[in-house]
Amino acid sequence: MKKISEFSLIFFFLVVSVVLAPSNQTTNTINQFSLEFYKETANKNTGKSLILSPLSAEVLLGLLSTGARGDTQKEISDALHLPDSEIIKSTFQTTMRKLSNIQGVVLNIANKVYVKDGEAFKLDPVFKSVAVDQFSSDVENIDFSKATRAANTINEWVESKTNNKIKDFVSPDIFDENTRIMLVNAIYFQGNWENPFDKRSVQKTKFKKNKIDKVEVDIMYQTDDFPYANLPEWNSEILALPYKNNDTYLAIILPRKVDGLAALEEKLYGANMVNIINKMRKTEVHVGIPKFKIESTIDLKHVLPELGIKLIFNKQKADLHNLLKNPEQLFVSDAKQKAFIEVNEHGTEAGVVTGFFNKNCSIKKQKLRVVADSARIDEEYFTADHPFFYMLMNKDDIIFCGKYIGD
């Protein structure tokens, strides 16, 4: 009987603010996945603040799809709303190039493929070519049987790519004699606000978690010109806080009602976020937003199947036979995401790592479109003192998103 093997897929993210963008015809479809990814994750993480990175998940799902076949590959393509593997490869190749050309902030992105040492475990040549040429991945042979050494090697790489923000990414007990491949994506971002908040503006303020419960938080205040729009169809308003290069920004969608976040989240599913962003116009806004830190750990085995990605977890039916030159029956045994975000007076910093564990089993710099060529309107007040949804974006593209409810 053919031996069944494992393919552990683990997402770990340490986040704080981010940026990147494919400004092409696929923007709406990628954003659609991002919002669906958020919605399903939020449904399974109620009652607490949340941070996640659809983009880092998309990158490795895209890479994984190039090693998949048949219905397994189709499920990933359908979930990403990209019709086939060729479109997936070209989309993420464009994304990787654009990431490397962002100006005004620190943004480093790296992919790595670790493959079990030995002649019997070479990567499929086509998969290796796609990983290197279109996903900008490095490839390294590693002896997974020496688990402690392997874990140390991978953790050192992760720390080096995330400015030491993510430590102990993997533990030795992840690896055994069946481990074949590990795919890793790491992103590090650091950016300062275009308009920093004065530390003296920070005030202790009651944050209304719901109609009854309140908690004291530090809220930062300032008045300046920001992209802003009222969203009556969502009973909400949206504000963008740009970073210094003006292409990257934190967008906050604030419900008018204290208990309006759940209704807003329902509106997000299937929304055209590009249209929402384009509604913003530069105006004087009296801004108040909380300083916050959020950490999230998410079991994606409960999220990805809700998005239609099921077969990769099936021991008998997963078809990932294009990963290795000598194919073996592989499946995804684990999928997790860990994230961290901090927002303060100066800006944000982010580190993201995504890992898939496989066992035998130049762009012209532009100003933010919503800021340019827009007439000034009357001043507005935007005080985020109750639960809200936020997105870390580059131009029109969602990189990280989540919710803050005051915990």
Image (tube, rainbow, N blue to C red):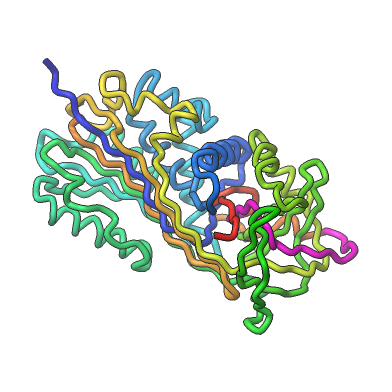
| Residue 388 within the segment the image draws in magenta | yes
Looking at the rendered image, the quarter that the C terminus falls into is bottom right
Q: Nearer the viewer, residue 45 or 182?
A: 45
User: Is residue 104 visible to us here?
Assistant: no
User: Is residue 339 visible to us here?
Assistant: yes
| Residue drawn at (47%, 28%) of the image | 77
Q: Position of residue 228 (x, y in %)?
A: 78, 58
- Whether residue 19 sits left or right of residue 287 in the image: it is left
Q: Report the residue that reaches farthest toward the bottom.
A: 200
| Residue 103 within the segment the image draws in magenta | no
Q: Report the residue that reaches farthest toward the front.
A: 212
Q: Nearer the viewer, residue 97 or 289?
A: 289
Q: Position of residue 58 (x, y in %)?
A: 46, 41
Q: Nearer the viewer, residue 389 or 33?
A: 389
Q: Is residue 406 above or below residue 11?
A: below
Q: Report the residue that reaches farthest toward the top.
A: 1
Q: Position of residue 222 (x, y in %)?
A: 73, 75
Q: Which residues are magenta?
A: 374-394
| Residue drawn at (31%, 38%) of the image | 334
| Residue drawn at (14%, 36%) of the image | 178
Looking at the rendered image, the quarter that the N terminus falls into is top left
How many marks overall? 0
Q: Quadrant of residue 133?
A: top left
Q: Is residue 268 above or below residue 1?
A: below
Q: Position of residue 179 (x, y in %)?
A: 17, 39
| Residue drawn at (56%, 36%) of the image | 36
Q: Nearer the viewer, residue 387 or 349?
A: 387
Q: Quadrant of residue 233?
A: top right
Q: Is residue 42 above or below residue 74?
A: below
Q: Quadrant of residue 6?
A: top left
